[in-house]
Image (tube, helix red, strand yellow):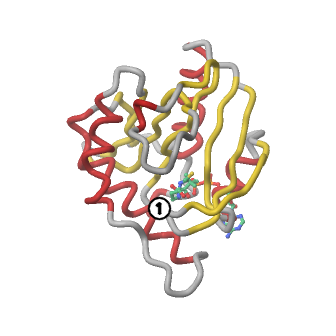
Amino acid sequence: MPDQVVTRPAGPADLDALLADVTAGFNSYVAFAPEGWEPPDMRTHRAWEAEVLADPATWALLAEVDGAPVGHVAFIPARRQAGERAHWRTRPVIAGLAHLWQLFVLPDWWGRGVAPVLHDAALAEMRGQGYELARLYTPAGHARARRFYERRGWVPLSEAFNEDLGLPLTEYRLLV
Ligand SMILES: CC(C)(COP(=O)(O)OP(=O)(O)OC[C@H]1O[C@@H](n2cnc3c(N)ncnc32)[C@H](O)[C@@H]1OP(=O)(O)O)[C@@H](O)C(=O)NCCC(=O)NCCS
C-alpha cells in the first residue's frame, strides 16, 4: 500500500465518508451493468447504514490519505434471509459465518494496493473474532471484483438477481 495511506477503525461518525465511498463504487458499476441501469440512491439507505455501523458487532476500517477517505472495509455477523422487508436485526445470525458487507475503494485508488490491505485486515479480524467462514456478494458481471476475490481464495457458490441493486449477484465463500 502507498506510504501515505493509513488505516483506522471506522464508526458512526464516518457515515458520510462511507456513503460517499459506496456511492462512487456503485456509480462505477455502469461500466458493466446493462444499458439503462442506474445506481441506487444511497440517501435512501442512510438510516440503515447508520444503524449497521452503530451496531457493536460491526467491524469497519477506513483507509485515508491526509485525512481524506480513500476506501473502507466492513464486516458483520451473517444473517439469514427472512422475507424481503424484514428488519435486519430480526433476521437470525448464522453462527461462525462473517458477512463481508462492504469493500469499497475510490476509483483513483484501484490497483494501488489499498484494497488488498483492507481485505487482509478484515480477514485477520474475522479470524481473531473466531469466525470460521466468510461470505460476500458481488455483481456477477463485475469482472474486476471477481478477479480480486478469486485471487484471494474466495469460491463462487450461487447467483441470484438482487432487486435492490437491479443486478445479479454472485455469492462467494471463503474459509477464514
Ligand atoms: C473491487 C475492488 C475493491 C478491488 O480493488 P482494486 O484495487 O480495484 O483491486 P486490484 O487492482 O488489486 O485487483 C483487481 C484485479 O482485477 C484485474 N482486473 C482489472 N480489471 C479487470 C477486468 N475488467 N476484468 C477482469 N479482471 C480485471 C486486475 O488486473 C487485478 O488482478 P491482478 O491482481 O491479478 O492483476 C475495487 O475495484 C472497488 O472498490 N470497486 C468498486 C466497489 C466494489 O465493487 N466493491 C466490491 C463490492 S463486493
Count of marks overlaid on the render: 1
Decide: is 13 above or below 70: above
Seen in the image, is 93 located left or right of residue 53?
right
Q: Residue furthest bottom?
A: 35
Seen in the image, is 20 located left or right of residue 110?
left
Looking at the rendering, which quadrant does residue 8 occupy?
A: top left
Q: Amino acid at mark 1?
A: Asp
Q: Position of residue 97 (x, y in %)?
A: 63, 26
Looking at the rendering, which quadrant does residue 55 occupy?
A: top left
Q: Secondary structure at mark 1?
A: loop
Q: Residue furthest left?
A: 13
Q: Which residue is mark 1?
A: 164
Task: Check the picture and name the quadrant holding the C terminus.
Answer: top right
Q: Position of residue 25 (x, y in %)?
A: 45, 61
Q: Position of residue 57 (x, y in %)?
A: 42, 22
Decide: is 6 above or below 46: above
**Which residue corresponds to the image point at 35% horizontal and 35% vertical from the top-left?**
52
**Which residue corresponds to the image point at 44% horizontal and 40% vertical from the top-left?**
3
Question: Where's ligand 1: which quadrant?
Answer: bottom right
Q: Position of residue 173 (x, y in %)?
A: 72, 38
**Which residue corresponds to the image point at 26% horizontal and 59% vertical from the top-left?**
43
Seen in the image, is 67 located left or right of residue 84?
left
Decide: is 169 above or below 132: below
Report the front residue among 40 and 152: 40
Decide: is 52 above or below 42: above
